Amino acid sequence: MSSVKKVVLAYSGGLDTSIIIPWLKEHYGDAEVIAFCGDVGQGDDYDAVKKKALDTGASKCIVKDLREEFVRDYCFKALAAGAIYEDRYLLGTALARPLLAYHQTQVALEEGADALSHGATGKGNDQVRFEVTYGAFAPHLTVIAPWREWDIRSREDALDYADKHAVPVESSKKDLYSRDGNLWHLSHEGDILENVWNAPKKEMFKLTVDPMDAPDEPETIVLAFEQGVPVALNGTRLGPVEMVETLNRVAGAHGVGRLDLVENRLVGIKSRGVYETPAGTVLHLAHRELERLVLDRDTLHFKQSISVRYAQLVYDGLWFSTLREALAAFVDETEKEVSGEVRIRLYKGVADANGRRSDSSLYREDLATFGEGMAYDHADAGGFIRLYGLPERVRALTRDKVTVDVKAVDITRPVGKPEGDEK
């Protein structure tokens, strides 16, 4: 008989986690199952979720409202880092999993459980994200991953199991999409999307209108940031959750935020996902434009390089790693001057920036202008270019094919041009 007596399950009330409750009790000696549900903005009816968990065998269902923490400490931190996986994916699922796993682990410790369980498949990234976090905070607890143990191999199999065990589910064999939703995004996988040549169906989308059906007139919005954090929309201050919810509605109404992507999973499999991230798309654009205004060239370029690594760490489930936390400290330093406003136009699925301003701006009109009154002396560029290109000049003069007398040439000045002639 299994030594597992009490299991805390990461529970959503969806197909997979719904059938896990009776499966755990059936295969782990009628162990007590506690369902844990973290609200990161799925929009579920949590009274119904609790009832469903209890009706299918859970001893209790614990729900925590994590929306504020999710947006403030995860989404906005990734936003500040410019973290975008493989240049396009805004990490909606990847950001939520470590938060959910952390709180699930805390519940397990409080409840005296001896095991943790999740509904992630053996092919995906989520199993890594959950279990790496489990190991970071409760390495002594047993991990049960049913998808790596049971003989269910498809959503059709899962639906059959649910039917046999009288588990009510919303999925049907006519709608086999696998979806994951939170405040930051909604993802769609499976069904016709598994053939990468198939276009997504129009009715599949939930957060965004078809760009072809979007309003014929553009809408302009202004986003304000303080130290890299979005704080106001069109002059009205909004909290993190309200900011994302509002932008999801506004940008989604213009068809902004759709993404059809073939990505590389951590386990080595390529997968195809279709994502809707209206708020995240607009916020990343605005934040990036503001950084271009206020960060110096070296800092901006270096940050762009670490953004790639930051995104990979998040995608790979290493949110609580030393490296991610160290990179976050660097990001916090860069964000001290990232305050200001960006004007964004939304139109037919496209968001673009057409205005930005900041008290910390490094852009000076008197330097950039092509007109009169410039605070820039063009003559200064000559000396800079000679010094900047000095290594190449030395290399050219020392090649075998160069016949000039190297010792007789002043390599800090143009070859063949008399000293003092700078015209």
Image: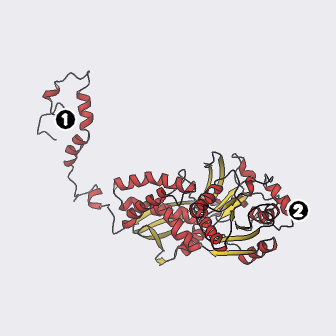
Picture mark count: 2
Amino acid bearing label 1: Pro
Q: Residue at x 36, y 55 (%)?
A: 299
In depth, the one of 208 and 53 nearer the eye is: 53
In depth, the one of 89 and 350 nearer the eye is: 89
The image quadrant that residue 241 belongs to is bottom right
User: Taking 252 as reference, is 340 left or right?
Assistant: left
Q: Residue at x 83, y 68 (%)?
A: 168
Q: Position of residue 72 (x, y in %)?
A: 52, 70
Q: Judge whether residue 225 can be spotted in this image.
A: yes
Disc 2 marks which residue?
A: 164
The image quadrant that residue 340 belongs to is bottom left
Mark-to-mark CA distance, 2 and 1: 86 Å
User: Taking 224 as reference, is 155 left or right?
Assistant: right
**Regarding mark 2 in the picture, which secondary structure is present there?**
helix
Amino acid bearing label 2: Lys
Position above or below: 382 against 334? above
Q: Position of residue 94 (x, y in %)?
A: 59, 59
What sort of colour scheme is used for the picture?
A: secondary structure
User: Taking 289 as reference, is 402 left or right?
Assistant: left
| Quadrant placement of the N terminus | bottom right
| Quadrant placement of the C terminus | top left
The image quadrant that residue 208 belongs to is bottom right
Q: Position of residue 109 (x, y in %)?
A: 63, 70
Q: Which mark is residue 274?
A: none
Q: Judge whether residue 10 can be spotted in this image.
A: no
Disc 1 marks which residue?
A: 414
**Regarding mark 1 in the picture, which secondary structure is present there?**
loop
In depth, the one of 283 and 76 nearer the eye is: 76
